[in-house]
Each structure stands twice: as structure tokens, then as C-alpha cells.
Amino acid sequence: MTSTIAPRVRTLVLLLLAATGLLLAGAGPVSAHAALTGSDPRQGAVVDKAPQQVSLTFSEKVALADDSLRVLDPKGKRVDRGDPAGTGGTTYSVKLHSGLPDGTYTVTYQVVSEDSHPVAGAYTFSIGAPSKTSVSVDDQAAGGGVVGVLYGFGRYVSYAGFIVLVGGAAFVLGCWRGGTAVRSMQRLVVSGWLALTAATLGLLLVRGSYTGSGKVGDIFDLDLLGQVLQTKTGAALVSRLLLLAAAALFIAVLFGAYDKRDDEEKRDLTFGLAIGGSVVAAGLAASWAMSEHASTGLQAGLAMPVDVLHLLAVAGWLGGLTALLVALYRAPVETPVDGAAVRRFSRLAFGSVLTLVVTGVYQSWRQLGSWSAFTGTRYGQLLLVKIGLVVLLVGIAWISRRWTARLAESGAAVSAEAAEEGESEADADADADVEKERVTSGAVTSAATTESGAADTGAGSERAAQLARQRAAVDTARRKRERDADPNRFGLRRSVLAEAGVAVVLLAVTTMLTSTEPGRTEEQAAAASSSATTEANAAGALTLDMSFDTGGEDGKGVVRIDLDPARSGANEMHVYVLRPNGRAFDIPEVKVAFTLEAQDIGPLPVVPDHISTGHWSASGVQIPMAGDWKIAVTVRTSDIDQATVSKNAQIG
């Protein structure tokens, strides 16, 4: 039985690393949490006169740096002047130089949303008429690359450290106070503290590069660190470090002075540790709530305390589960975790699950806003995965509760048998002591008859001590085998190990969820885009959005057709190919065809020119007459993957 412990723990560690690597590799750059909902000039617009400024409107307030908004001419030269500034609400603008020539201009932005995540993007507009441009409008990857991976890993480690620190300490103090003297429990809680402290320091260093240049070399830039310390996220990380200093004192008392006190002093110290530990744990949880999703958007004043409760419940459940797993596998034979401690943890876990359900329902409503967002947004899809994992975890926990009850019953039976066998064992021990005394006495008498008696006595004493140590080791191994042979304890171990494995994956999904754009924000951005399209149509232009799927890897997206003035005669056409998240999609080829089926005209092919990443344009597109035209777009995403989508629209 004992030989299988190490492989199982190694399996759990490998599962942790695999889940982390898979999710971090698949996550890519952090999704924008402040979506661009409007711009002036709007994306793809062709204006008659050069504007005096460019304005961008986001779904929430953002933080700006000196070069957060840039405007580049067709040759890639900056034409903006001065620093960007807010113009009221969530709209921000930057002024332009006067006398700008005709051509296609590129607007790039990189800001930090109010919930601490970097947001980047770009689009084009034209003055007079579209032109070729040397600016490549690639996917503006905010928080991507090596720095993004480091920051994401740091976030995961910080969550894991918080859960192990708070949950492990709560398990020892509230469920198994005998664990204060167990070395493996001490190492577990201290490891959680070290992981959270190291991750917090790492996040402070990486934060400046993560929200800015994304360069590894900027991680140790002290100027960037100074700028980070002046932000809301920097203040939250510094507060977390100060609270971790208080947590270190808590750990020192719990695993040091506590075990040396008598029962009455322990009761008083337990009350003080419970109050102080709760305050420190709530403060640590608040360092996330005050700087991330809960701190912005709908009902922020209520959302932050709810988020604190949610994090504490996660720590109580999953951190306590980790501590129970360590106790079941690593506790010494002299102080095994008993059924009473497991039952107390079961009640703690049940209360934590109830808290998770209540707070989770509120958070889901706040972040999604509609049932359709469950399946229509990435946040909703990840949330469905998280809900499924929680349900699975609760199911395994129910099995663990059954094993706990059986362990308690078997423990009572073993105690009764031990009481009955105590007298016979005492007699056997007495006989063994008499025999030992006889043998020792004979050895001493024999040794006294020779010159080397003293030396032989010394050797005999050393041999006796060695035999005593061997006997103690054998006795400990025997008791450990007897303990591990208990089928109820073995079943509880397996079910708790399964719970811990699911919890590892759940933590990874939760970390991804906190760095994904909320469904409510994504839908608001889509509604704003639709409103802008309606306004453009009212002004005489035509805008059509068509979803496509070429069937290949990375083959999904949206193609947008802008036709101006959408009347018979010559028209200006712009084609934009976007990813599902609204970013520019660089593909090899786009072709358009117009067909008026009622008059048997067409298809009239149009091959637009490639202007920039995800942007094609064609001038002088001739529409011979008004009518209900079918507009078909062929999108090729690779050498073999392409798809044709179409829509009908009234032109003229």
C-alpha cells in the first residue's frame, strides 16, 4: 500500500503541470476586458476632410499612457500630436496635425482596462480615398508572448498559493489541531505562503512589461516598476505583500507557540488565531477583488465583497482538501488524522460549497447578463466547463463522505477491540521485560569474569540500543501497514486523491476565466457595433456582416462588406475579415461577386486590393441597376481551406 503513495502524488503533480501547460498554451494573449464600442472616424470610413482628432469609445474606463493612442499615415509616420486624453465618460481622443494628405490612416491603441487587463487593437480609415499603406495591422497582442505566459503562470501560482495557505491553515485550526505538530502539514502551509509571496513579487516585476512593450528585457526596468506602483493593480499587489507579512506571523504562532501551550491557553489562542487569520485571509482575497473583474462594471460595491466570499470558499474547500490529502498520505503513525477531523472538514466543505453556489450564481449573472452568453461567448463556454467540474467535484465529495462515515464506524470498533486486548498485550510485554532482564543479567555476570568485560559491556549496550531502534522501526512499520490495510481509509484516500485531481483542473479553468472578457461586455460591444452599422446604413452606406467557417484550423471568422453609397453606378467597397473576437484576420485571399437574380444579371466578380491585415478595398464597383442584390464573398484561409458565404441586400 505504501509503495503506491509516491506514484500517486507524482501523478497529481504531473496532472497539475499538464493542465497548466495546456491551458496557458491554448489561452494565447489575454482577451480584452474593455471592448472598443465606437470610434470617430469609424472603422473603414472614408471622410472628405482630414479630422482634427481621432476619438475612441470603450465599454468601460481605461488607463492611458503617453503613446496609448497613435495615428499613422500611409508611410507609417505618426501624425498625432500631444498626449491622449479623456473627453468624458469612456471616450478618449488624440489630436492630429493639420493639412493631412489623402490616403489610408491607421489608428492603433494599447490601454489598460479598469479590471487590470491590457487591451490593444488597430483599425484604418481613409481621407479622400483609400490608398496603399505600409503599416501592417496585425492582431495587436496585448499581454501575449513570453511575458504574457510568465504573467499567466504567476497568476496561477498566486491563486494556488492562496488556496493552499488559507485552506491548509483553516484545516489545521478548525478540523485537526493535532496537525500543528505534524511536519508535513507545516511544510504544506509554508509552501503555500512561499508560492503566494514569490508569485506576487514576480507579478509586480512583470506587470510593467505585460501592459506595455511585452519585452522580456523590460521586466527589470525600475522606471516601469515605479509606474506600476502608482496603479490600482500595483497598490493591490503591495497590499498583498504586507498582508503576507502578517500571515507569516500567524504561521509562526500556529506551528510554533500553539503546540507548547496547555489546554486552557490553547482555547484562548485558538480564538485569537481564528479572528486574526480570518481578517488576514479576507484581506488577501480583497487584493484580487479590488483590482479585477469585481472592481468594475455592474454593482461593483456589492460584487467585491461577494468576490471575497467566493475566494474564501474556494480556499476553504480546495485548500482544505489538499491538506486532508497530505494528512491521509503523510501523517505519522503516532498522530494519524482521525474520523472526527475528517467529519469536521466535511462540514466545512459543505458550507464552502453552499457559499460557492450562491456567490457563483450572482457572479455568473453579473458577468454574462443573458442566457445566450453561456454558449455565444468564450466566457460563457469556460463558465460551463467550470460548472461541470464543480458538479463532478461535488459528486466525488459525496463518495468521500460515505468513506468518512465508514472510517468513523471502523475506528470505534478498533477502539473497542484495543480495549479488550489491552490486558493480554500488557501481560505479554511484562513477560518480555522479565526475559530481557534475565538475558541482560546473564550477560553482565559472564562479562565480569574476563579482563575485556568492560569493553564487552559497552559493545553490548550499543548493540542493545541498535536493536531497540530496529524494534521501534519494525513496530512503526507494522502499525503503518495495519493502518493502511483498513479498506475504509484506503477508499477515502482514493476518493480524496480524485477530488484533488479535479480541483487542479478546476483551478486552471478558473484562472483562465479571470483573464477572459466577460460575456456581458462582449455582447455590449457587439450591440454597439450593430448600432454603428445601422447608423451607417441610414446615412446611405451599406454594411453586411457574414460569419464563415472554412473547416480548417483557425478557420472561423466574420467578413464585413462596406458599400458606399450603395446605389446604382460607381461604389466604394471595403472588405474586412475579422476573427470571432473582432480583431483583424490576416488571410490569403478574398473575392466578391454581385448577382441580381430577378433580372438574371451576374455574377459580377470583384477582386479587391489588399490594403492591410484583414482589410481589402475596391474603387469604382459598378452596380448597373437598383434591386435586391445577392452579395457572395469567397474567403480562403489556407491553400486548401475556403468557404463562400452570401447575403441579399437592397442596393439603390
Image (spheres, rainbow, N blue to C red):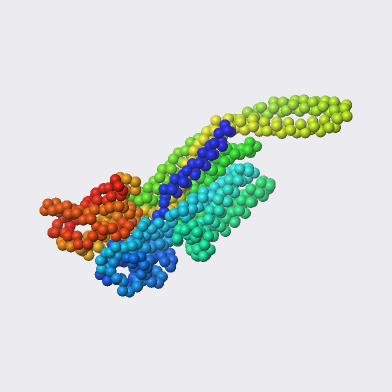
Q: Is residue 448 above or below residue 253?
A: above
The residue shown at (30%, 52%) is: 588
Q: Residue at x 69, y 26 (%)?
A: 424
Q: Quadrant of the N terminus?
A: top right
Residue 268 image point, x, y percent: 64, 51
Say above or below: 531 vs 365: below
Q: Residue furthest bottom?
A: 98
Q: Nearer the viewer, residue 620 or 181?
A: 620
Q: Nearer the viewer, residue 81 or 340?
A: 81
Q: Position of residue 159 (x, y in %)?
A: 50, 51
> In the figure, residue 80 lies in which quadrant?
bottom left
Residue at 43% x, 43% y: name it. 389
Nearest the eye: 246 or 585 = 585
For image coordinates 46% across by 50% down, the residue present is: 511
Left or right: residue 263 compared with residue 455: left
Considering only vertical position in the picture, is 511 above or below 39? Answer: above
Residue 500 lies, in percent from the top left, at 50, 41
